[in-house]
Amino acid sequence: MATCPNCDAQILLEASKCPACSAVFGEGSAWHPIAQSPEVEQQLRQRYAASTPTIATEVTSGGNEIARVEKVIDAPEIRYPVEFTASVGEYFRIWIVNLALTILTLGIYSAWAKVRKKRYFYGHTKIAGDSFEYRANPVAILKGRLIAVGALAVLYAVGQFAPSFRWIVYIAAAFIVPWLIVRSMAFKAYNSAYRNIRLHFRGTYLECLRIIVGYGLLMPVTFGLAYPYLKARLVKFAAWNHYYGTMQFEVADLRQQFRRIFGNGVVGIGLLIGLVVGALHGGGTAVFGWRPDSSAVSVGSTLVSYAGLLLIFAYSRSRYTNATFNNLSLGRVRFECALRARELFWLYLVNILAIIVTLGLATPWAAVRTLSYRAEKMTMLAAGGLDNFFAAESAQVSAAGEEVGEMFDIDIGL
Amino acid sequence: MIEFSAIYYDGKTSARTPVRVRGYTRTLHIVGADVNIEVPLPEVRVDAPVANTRRALHLPGGSQLQTEDHAALAALFPRAHRLQTWVQALERRWGYALAAIVVIGGFTWWCLSYGLPVTAKAIAGFVPITIEAKLGEQTLYTLDQSLCSPSAVAADRRQAVLKSFGTLTAGLNDGYAYRLELRACGRIGPNALALPGGTVVVTDDLVNLAQNDQQVAAILAHEIGHVRYRHGLRLALQAAGVAALIAALAGDAVSITNLAVILPTALLQSGYSRELEAEADLYAFQRLKEIGSSPKYFAEIMTLLEEHRDKRASSEGNGKRDKSADASGASDYLSTHPATARRIERALANQ
C-alpha cells in the first residue's frame, strides 16, 4: 500500500489515479504515491525511475561521505508564450455600448459592463491554447461599488464640513485599507480560472495590517526610503498567499532588486529637478534669451517634468514587474517577463495623447495595445510541459470561507 | 440532437481532454478519452456570451466544458442570459456603437449644462445653513492661510463700506448671518467673494479701485445674491458631480491615462458659473433699486474692473506681444466672469 501525496488517502501501489481526490500519477506527473515501507519504496523507485531520473552525488569531506544528495533532473522546459488575441474594433464596440448602457441606467449596469469587458480580455488571453476565465458575479461587484461610493461620500463630507474630525478618518483608513487589499485580492483570485482551476488568495487581514501599519510608520521616519522594502514585502505577501488550485506560488527575496530600482528612480527624479531648475534659471536665458519667468520657459519646464515623471514611472513599472515575474514560480512552472522602460514610455505617451485628442474615444485602443504589449513580453515555462502539470483542487479550498471573496470587489492597484 | 466539439476539464486537475458532446432534450452526453458521462441538461449552467470568446458550460460536480461552437450553444440554451445576449447583439454592429457615442455625448452635454446644476440646486435646498456656514468658514481659513492678509484700508472708508453692507442686508430675513470681511489679497487683485453661509470677502484693491461707495455697494449686492442663491454650495456640489461623471466615463482608462481627464475638468468648471453670475447680477439690480441706489453703479464698477484688467494684460505683455496675446486669450477663456460688456449692457437696461 501507499498514500496519495495530495490527500493522504490509502491507495494501491499500481494506481494511476487517486480514487479519493483524482490526483494523477505517472510518467511526467509531478506527483507519485508515497511509500509506507522500505520494500514498497524500492518498488516505487523502479516504477517511476523513468519519469524522474535522479543523479546521486556523493558529498564528501576529507574522503568521508557525509551526505548523499539526490537531485531530480528536470524534464526539459517547454516555453509557452502568452497570446493576446483581442481586436481593437471588437473591444471598442463592447466598451462604447456598455458605457452607454451604464449611463442610461445611472451607473447600475456598470457592474455588468465591467464583467463583460473583463471576460472579453480574459477570454482573449491564452496560454497553450486555453484561455483564462473571469467568473465574477456582477451583483457582488455592484454591492462593492455601492459601499465604496457611500464611503467616499462620507469621506468627502467629513473633509468639507467637519475638518477637525479628519484624523478619525485617517486612523480608520489605516485599518480599512489592509482589509480592502486582502478582499480585493481574494475576489480577483477567486474569480480567475485557467483550465477550470481557480486561483485562491489566502492572505490574512492581520498580516496585511501589520505590513501596512508597520511600514506606514516607517515611511515618514526614513523619508520614504523604506518604499522598496514595503513594496517587496507586499509582493512577497501577495505571491506566497496565491494558489493555483492547491499549488502555492513562490517568490524569491526581492528587496535587493527593488532597492536598486528605487535608487535609480530617485536619481532620475533628482536629475529631472536639476534639469527643470536649470531650464528656469540660466539655461533658458543663456540659450534662447528668454527671461526666467517668461511663460515659454515655464510651459517648457512643465512639459519636461511631466515627460520626466512619465519616464520614471515607465522605468519603475517595467523593472518592478520584470523583477517580480522573473522570480515567481508555481511548482515546476516559472515566468519570464521582459518589459522595456523605453517601449513602455512611448506606449503610455502615445496612449495619453491619443486619448486627449480623441476626447477619450481612443481608450479601448489604448487598453488593447497596452495589454497586448504586456502579453507579448510574458512567457511561461513549464518543465515537462503543461499537460502533465498538475494542480488538484481539493474540496477544502472552496469551503475555506472564501465565499467572502465573492462579497465585494473594489479595484485596488498595487 | 445537437453535436459539437468541446474540451473537458475535470475541475480537479489542469488536464484537458478533447471530447464530442451530444445534446439531447434532457441530457448532455460527453464522450472522449477516459471520459464518458451523461449530465442532466437542467443542471448545466452556461456562461453568458461575450463576442466570440469561448463559452464555458459548468457541469454539476465542478467539471466544465469549453467550446467555440456558439451556434450549438444558442440552440441548446435558447433562453439563457437574455439580457446579455441582447447586449451582445448590440456590441456586434458598428451602427449601435455610433448610437452609443451619440447617447454618451448627448448625456454628458445635458449633464453639464442642465442636469448637474439643477440637481445641485435641488440638493442644496436640503443642506442646513449651519453646515453651509461651516463650508464658508473653512474657505475663509484657507484664504487667510494662503492668499490674504489683514486689510489696510483707512478706518473711515472701512466704516462706509460696512455701513452700505448693513443697508443691503437689513431686513433680508433669509436665515443667513451676513458678515463682511475686508482683506488685502494682492495676488487676486480687485475682487470680491461670496462664501457659503453669508460671509462676503472684499479685497482692498477693489475698495481702492471704486470711485465711490455706491460702486462698492453694487458689488456687495451682487455677492449677497450669490449667498442667497447658495451658489458656493451649489458649485461645490456640481464639482463633486463632475468628478463622479468623469470617474464613471473614464473609470476603466488604463491607470496613468487617467491624468488626461484632469485638464478638461478645469475648463468645464468655468462654464457653468456664467449662469450663476447672471442670476446674482439680476438680484443685485433689484436690490440696489430697493435701497434707493441704481444698477448704473454696477455698470460703472464693471467698466473700471475691465479697464484694470486690460491695463494689467498690456503691462505684462511689454516686449513680447505675440505671447501676451496668447496668455490673455487663455485667461479670458478660463475667466469665471461672462463677457463683461454684456453684463454692463444688462445693468444699464435694468435701471
Image: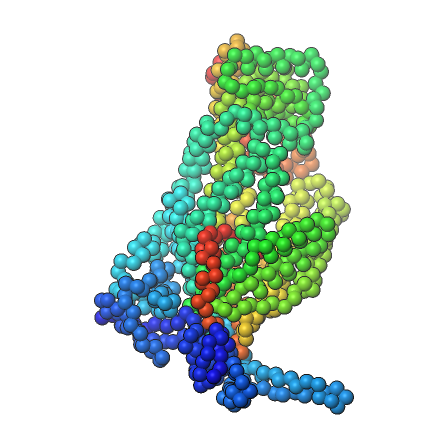
Quadrant of the snapshot with the N terminus of chain B: bottom left
In the rendered view, would you say A414 is above or below A74? above
In the rendered view, would you say B150 is above or below A189? above
Number of numbered markers: 0
Give how far across and how far down residue A336 sits, in percent. Answer: 57, 70
Give how far across and how far down residue B2 sits, in percent. Answer: 25, 70
In the rendered view, would you say A48 is above or below A30? below
The residue depicted at 55 percent of the width and 43 percent of the height is B263
Give how far across and how far down residue A29 sits, in percent. Answer: 49, 80
Horizontally, is A410 left or right of B138 in the view?
A: left
Along the viewing direction, whichever of B346 and A410 lies nearer the viewer: A410
Horizontally, is A245 left or right of B332 in the view?
A: left
Along the viewing direction, whichever of A304 and A387 lies nearer the viewer: A387
The residue depicted at 50 percent of the width and 63 percent of the height is A200
The residue depicted at 71 percent of the width and 59 percent of the height is A263
Horizontally, is B263 left or right of B123 in the view?
A: right
